[in-house]
Image: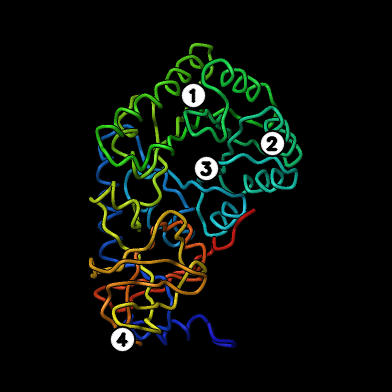
Amino acid sequence: MEPQMSEKSFRKQFIGKSVEELDTPVIVADLDALEANLSLLSGYFSGRHCKVRPHFKSHKCVTMARRQLACPNTVGITCAKISEAEVLVAGGIEDVLLANQLIGRNKVRRLARLNKQARVRGVVDSRQGVDRLGTAARDEGVTIGVLVEVDIGMNRCGVLPGGPALELAELVVRTGGLRFDGLQGYEGHLVTTENYEERCRLVAEALAPLIETRKAIENAGLTVSIVSSGGTGTYDITGNIEGVDEVQCGSYALMDAQYSKVRPEFRNARYVLATVISTRGEKAVADVGLKGMGAEYAAPVVEGHPEAEVLYVAEEHTVIESLAAAPGDRIRLIPPHGCTTNNLYERMWLVRRDIIEDIWPIEGRGCLE
């Protein structure tokens, strides 16, 4: 935004104009595709026990979170960082799951204080985490709902299924200021398995210890209100496993080039609008690179040009082969990883039939702590 220009004046300058008039690179979302994606996932869970808790980290945009919450069968929002939770609560979101461990004393205090304004649950996988959350909750005079995370194959965070998870749940119950609400287990190592039948088999195997852990905890006399799991790649697998109450889908709303390979039913609603700044024969160089596009998994896709091949993505440039273009031409790049793309921009431009209809701030940009 230009210095001294109000938000109202800024919006007035662009609303109703062609997206092609924007300086590049910018991140753009097609409203027709976005709305279709929201409707598809929401509709899938109609009449099912399991519901949706969309993940904020995929877009970092509070307006998008509100759109998701307005869809039927959505129970709240998931986030990864305490700073993201603060942005969501400041934006009026009243039910948040912070699906990550908080250990820092200042961070647990921030979580406790948020619970004076909204219901913001935390996740634990250690005695230290339980102790620090409990202390912060008591100091602030609140009760924090807690999920025990169970490692179901990610080999990242989480306690082992069965006895270790039960012991930690019992510790939560005995800790003043905390409320044991249930379990979290994420099969993230399986969500992009390309063969669908294999994905179904592997997910069922991974989730089985989580469901058995739920039964063991309930048999011990504790109430498990929530088992939270799943993602876009497994929504129709995990979401149909008895004992799972909510799925943390995130990428479905905007999608990206990698997820499209396993979830073609969702449309690529997001692209990075870029400008060709240099050409040599059929090699073109665009004005966006790693500083404007998450490309840690693979190369971006040039929309509308299946013949084009991205040779590499540098800091400020994307070099493309077999693309007939001239300097000044606009191209649309589908990022291979949308989550790390949105985190790089201050705003997202919303278009319908290439006309700018709205501008959404990306409030969670840079929320890393």
The kind of residue on which mark 2 rests is Leu
The answer to the question of whether label 2 and label 3 lie on touching residues, with beta carbons closer than 8 A, is no
The kind of residue on which mark 4 rests is Ala
Q: Which residue is mark 1?
A: 224
- Residue 9 is situated, as x and y percent measured from the top left of the image, at 48, 86
Question: Residue at point 37% right, 81% down?
Answer: 276
Quick one: label 1, few (<14), some, or many (20+) residues within 10 Å?
A: some
The answer to the question of whether label 1 and label 4 lie on touching residues, with beta carbons closer than 8 A, is no
Q: CA distance from mark 2 to mark 3?
A: 14 Å
**Mark 1 vs mark 3: which is more N-terminal?**
3
Q: CA distance from mark 4 to mark 3?
A: 48 Å
- Return the residue nearer the eye: 92 or 320: 320
Q: Which residue is mark 2?
A: 133
Question: Residue at point 76% right, 39% down?
Answer: 139
The answer to the question of whether label 1 and label 3 lie on touching residues, with beta carbons closer than 8 A, is no
Question: Residue at point 31% right, 66% down?
Answer: 309
**Mark 1 vs mark 4: which is more N-terminal?**
1
Quick one: label 4, few (<14), some, or many (20+) residues within 10 Å?
A: some
- Return the residue nearer the eye: 67 or 247: 247
The kind of residue on which mark 1 rests is Val
Q: Secondary structure at mark 3?
A: strand
Q: Secondary structure at mark 1?
A: loop
Q: Which residue is mark 3?
A: 97
Q: CA distance from mark 1 to mark 4?
A: 60 Å
Q: CA distance from mark 4 to mark 2?
A: 58 Å
Q: Which residue is mark 4?
A: 326
Image disc number at residue 336: none
